[in-house]
Image (cartoon, coloured by chain):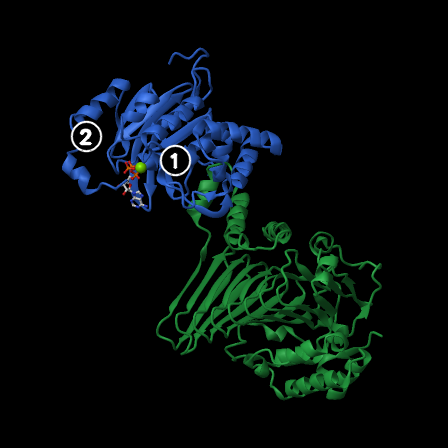
Chain colours: A green, B blue
Amino acid sequence: MSNSLILNSITKEGVDILATQQGEPAWSKELRTRAWESYLKKPFPSENDPAWKKTRLSLLDFSRLSAKSFTPLSEKQTDSGLTDNLIDHVAKMGGLVFSYQSQENSFCQVELSAEAKAKGVKLVAIPQASKEAPEILKQFEKNAPEAEDDKFILMSRALFNCGGVLSVPDNVEIDDPFVFITNLASDCVDGALFPRVIVKVGKNSRIRVVNHFTSSGSNVSSQIVFSNALTEIQAESGAYVSYVEVQNYADNVFSLNRQFNNLQKDARIYSLNVGLGGKQIRADIYTHLSHSGSSASVMGVALASSDQSIHYNTVQDHQAPHTTSNIDFRIALRNHSVSCYHGNIRIAKEAQQTDAYQSSKNLLLGEDARAEAVPNLEILANDVKCSHGATVGPVDKEQIFYLNSRGLDKTTAEELVITGFFNTVLATNPIAGVDAFIQELVASKVQSSNK
Amino acid sequence: MAAKTPAKEILRVENLHVEVDGKSILKGVNLTINSGEVHALMGRNGSGKSTLSYALMGHPKYTITQGKIIFLGQDITEMSPDERARLGLSLAFQYPVAIPGVSVSNFLRAAVKAKRGKDVPVKEFRAELKKVMGELGVPNEFLSRYINDGFSGGEKKRLEIMQLEMLKPSLAVLDETDSGLDIDALKTVSEGVNRLVTPESESGILLITHYQRILNYVKPHFVHIFEDGKIIKTGGSELSKKLEEEGYDWVPGMSSRNLDLSQATST
Ligand SMILES: Nc1ncnc2c1ncn2[C@@H]1O[C@H](COP(=O)(O)OP(=O)(O)OP(=O)(O)O)[C@@H](O)[C@H]1O
Ligand SMILES: [Mg+2]
């Protein structure tokens, strides 16, 4: 039952029908239709809106894009379009794979490991979440103040149709990651995807999550398709979540990602966002340090080429004393790709003795590449450590000469320097097994874009 | 000089003039190095020794305005640095640059592959590395560290020599590789340098230094004095000993010391 709804003509009733088709209960339909009503009321961001003007929203044509629901595959069936070694080698604890194909949308679940089951972990696919994890969905209805006012988050709350809910009880420690995969087949011409991942981690638990957005197939359609993702992570007291997101969509995707990290007392998050694909990447990462002792490391690595456009927006929101945040974003641009990084540090009056650090480094490889880094500080407390720094510049010629002097040609030398530029951040990734996967993707993008 | 095989010309520099940022630095350098020979190049700060080493390696900022460089019979004056390196020219830098994120082992692997024109099997490569590292007293953890990143002065110099030993160049230019080395390190590094050139080998060395002490270990066949962009005197190993004792003032053609200090660069 793969009904599709054209985005610009969806009514409140349409959303209700979509929810009904997914067999959702009344409360869930109600939440969706309410979100959709707010969405409809909210104007589309204007071209001059400072929060959006660096994102090429004009690429989106909602009269062409349609939302569809996903049907479950039986466990034995493998997903035809996707060969992904994350599933074979990394998703040992369990995972979910959603695949948006031209003909059919489907999803399958990598069964939870015996260890995860025994420890009480729950992993529910979004199409089943309103029945199997209703209390979590209800709880995550309010993720952050920002969300109330954002047209695309409202859209996602109304239409989310893939992804999953991962819930971990207190005092659980698991090394191997849980894996979410969203595959938007590259030959899709009218796809609109609304992935939502909710991660709720109980007190003193320590877990790892990989969230991978990708496109299968080599035949890339020239029509822009849309992925509007929402990721909500909640770490309760003393919990530690490592989250690695990799986005290597085909270059016809408009990839919008909003991530909310909510940290309770003494909770920690390590977050790494790797952005490689897509025509337009827009990612907002909000980290709410709302209880004392919480700390966050938010890392980002992005490589763009041809006419790709990247816009990252990070918010380090310190609301409580003794909180720590460290943001490190590295962007390399080839050809005439462009990027913009907005780094916001907010320190509330009561958030004394906090420590906030932000670094943005941008490497311009193409002569026409442009990068912009805009820090924005709002510090109301007086006893804080806060620093930020941004660099924008070409590759260091002395480094290239050094490598040349050892026989490496210009191309190889430059590739090595770019790889190195990313590696200092990628080396902080604590999830074993994904680093090789990421390095490979980065290396192949570095090479393929080097023309 | 006591080469068993007949000496072969490795490098011939003819009337080399070099400019950097529009400023003329080298003003007619002539130098020939044959296989099996060690040439020491000495001279005051700012006389242009590093400029010569960069120009030989082909640094894009150093423009050759006159003269030519013949390496192994080929005119390399117009060649890119990486082509020169693959031909067998190498430079141990006075100030090696750090490249964060690129591990020494990945880099060496790529360099060895480039120089030899083919991939070296991992096992073979490791064995070679192990040997060189053992000889130079370089700890294993160097391999996983990033190139020169956070390295001490002496560690950087060791890494330079380690690279030369892996790449086995026909001409190694060593720019103050002895500076900043402690007494033991100087000895180990000198031994490494001596392994690069033997009477039988088809290679030569141009060793830039301020001090006699490395020349006690690496015996030069020729000592050149560099001043204001050219070689103003050439002699045997006795020359460096005399410099050590008497300084540069006696050397004919040397400008007065006060003048030099005013334009000296610090090391
Ligand atoms: N980019 C530049 N612009 C202007 N002058 C330069 C530049 N690079 C080098 N020079 C000058 O060229 C001269 C030679 O410098 P070089 O580094 O070759 O000297 P050196 O003999 O190696 O000195 P040292 O013994 O201190 O290492 C110096 O006066 C230096 O200031
Ligand atoms: Mg010098």
Q: Secondary structure at mark 2?
A: loop
Residue drawn at (44%, 12%) of the image: B6
Three-letter amino acid code of the residue under disc 2 = Met
Quadrant of res A250: bottom right
Q: Is residue A433 left or right of residue B228?
A: right
Q: Do the residues at discs 2 and 1 belong to one chain?
A: yes
**Could you tell me if residue A267 is visible in this image?**
yes
Q: Position of residue A334 (x, y in %)?
A: 55, 56
Q: Please count the marks in the image.
A: 2
Label disc, if present, on residue B157 of the rendered structure: 1
Q: Is residue A160 left or right of residue B132?
A: right
User: Does A173 sit above or below residue A291?
Assistant: above
Three-letter amino acid code of the residue under disc 1 = Lys
User: Does A418 sit above or below residue B243?
Assistant: below
Residue under circle 2? Answer: B254
Q: Residues within 10 Å of mark 1 (few under 14, many from 20)?
A: many
Judged from the image, the quadrant occupied by ligand 2 is: top left
Q: Residues within 10 Å of mark 2 (few under 14, many from 20)?
A: some
The reply to whether discs 2 and 1 touch (Cβ–Cβ < 8 Å) is no
**Gap in Å between the C-alphas at discs 2 and 1?**
30 Å
Mark before the other along the chain sequence, 2 or 1: 1
Residue nearest the observer in this picture, B227 or A81? A81
Label disc, if present, on residue A155 of the rendered structure: none
Q: Position of residue A415 (x, y in %)?
A: 54, 48
Q: Chain of mark 1?
A: B
Q: Is residue A234 left or right of residue B182?
A: right
Q: Secondary structure at mark 1?
A: helix
User: Does A395 sit above or below residue B239?
Assistant: below
Residue nearest the observer in this picture, B142 or B36? B142
- Rendered-image quadrant of the N terminus of chain B: top left
- Determine if the C-beta at disc 1 is less than 8 A from ligand 2: no
